[in-house]
Image (spheres, rainbow, N blue to C red):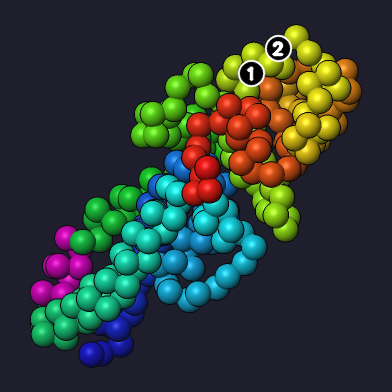
Amino acid sequence: MNIYLALLLFSFIILLYWVITELFTFFFRLTGLPVEKARFQVISLLTGTGFTTRESEMVLSSRRRRRLARVTMLFGYVFNITIVTAFINVFLTMKLSQVGYHFLSFLIPLGTAALIFIFMRVPKIRAIGDNLLRRLADRAFDRKEAFNAVMLIDNISSESIVQVTLRHIPEEYQGLSLAETRLRAETGIMVMLIERQGGKPMPAHADTVFEVGDKLTVFGDYNAICKAFHAREHFADD
């Protein structure tokens, strides 16, 4: 294989890997995983590096994510061994003119997908994409307005930092101040920040009353948070 073919093959595989990574990142984001954490875990799963961080607990905490992680690992294994080997064999057996023709036939759809992913990084377009992603997630996982949205931000030992978006106020908390809900006293859940109407996140106070649309940054046991705020996602130890 000459240097031209080697560079051509290397560039093609890098582009293909990037598109596949973004695709699986999209799937993990549907489960509520933040984009940067999702992308890092996808790269680790696809490449089989076994790189483990505390963030990996986010994948293990959800039944859906564990299933998706298994699919990602199996896909990465098959891709690394079978697809890459097949490409190398094809490039070795084809003539230079044939390589260029077949490469372009694969490059066009891959290039289109790459442009779409790059285009989605524009802030305004990304905001539209995030809204569409939330709608797709609602349909994909049969989430209804009766359930609040939960996104895991980080794990600290056995506790979690979670963002809860209130689509409705749980009946037991309606019209009550944060102090009156007795969330911290009865469940160990601490509401740290509250973001209202797209404003800057502000510390929650004892007299804070929940409103529909609030985004709460909450600390406590993951399952307890989901149960207290009527979250839709299920966990292995439910």
- Which residue is outermost to the bottom? 1
Residue 33 at what x, y percent from top left? Answer: 54, 47
The residue under the point 23% across, 90% down is: 1
Q: Residue furthest right?
A: 206
Judged from the image, the secondary structure of the residue bearing numbered disc 1 is: loop
Q: Residues within 10 Å of mark 1 (few under 14, many from 20)?
A: some
Q: Tag 2: residue type?
A: Gln
- Residue 186: image location, x then y, percent: 78, 31
Graded by Cα atoms within 10 Å as few (under 14), some (14 to 19) or many (20 or more), the crowding at tag 2 reads few
Q: Which mark is residue 73?
A: none
Q: Looking at the image, which is closer to me, 114 or 87?
A: 87
Foreground residue among 180 and 108 = 180
Image disc number at residue 170: 1
Residue shown at 78%/38% (left/top)?
188
User: Which residue does the numbered mark 2 point to in the structure image?
Assistant: 174
Main secondary structure of the magenta stretch: helix
Q: Is residue 18 at least partly visible in the picture?
A: yes
Which type of secondary structure does the marked residue at label 2 adopt?
loop
Q: Is residue 142 left or right of residue 169?
A: left
Q: Where is 147 relative to 98, above or below?
A: above
In the image, what residue occupies the spot 22% across and 76% down?
82
115 shown above or below 4: above
Q: Nearer the viewer, residue 209 or 47?
A: 209
Mark 1 residue type: Pro
The picture places residue 160, in percent across and down from the top left corner, at 69, 48
Say if 68 sits above or below 94 in the image.
above
Give the image quarter of residue 124: top right
Residue 15 visible = no
What's the CA distance linking mark 1 and mark 2? 6 Å
Residue 100 colored in magenta in the image: yes
User: Do the CB atoms of the residues marked 1 and 2 lie less than 8 Å apart?
Assistant: yes
The span shown in magenta is 98-105
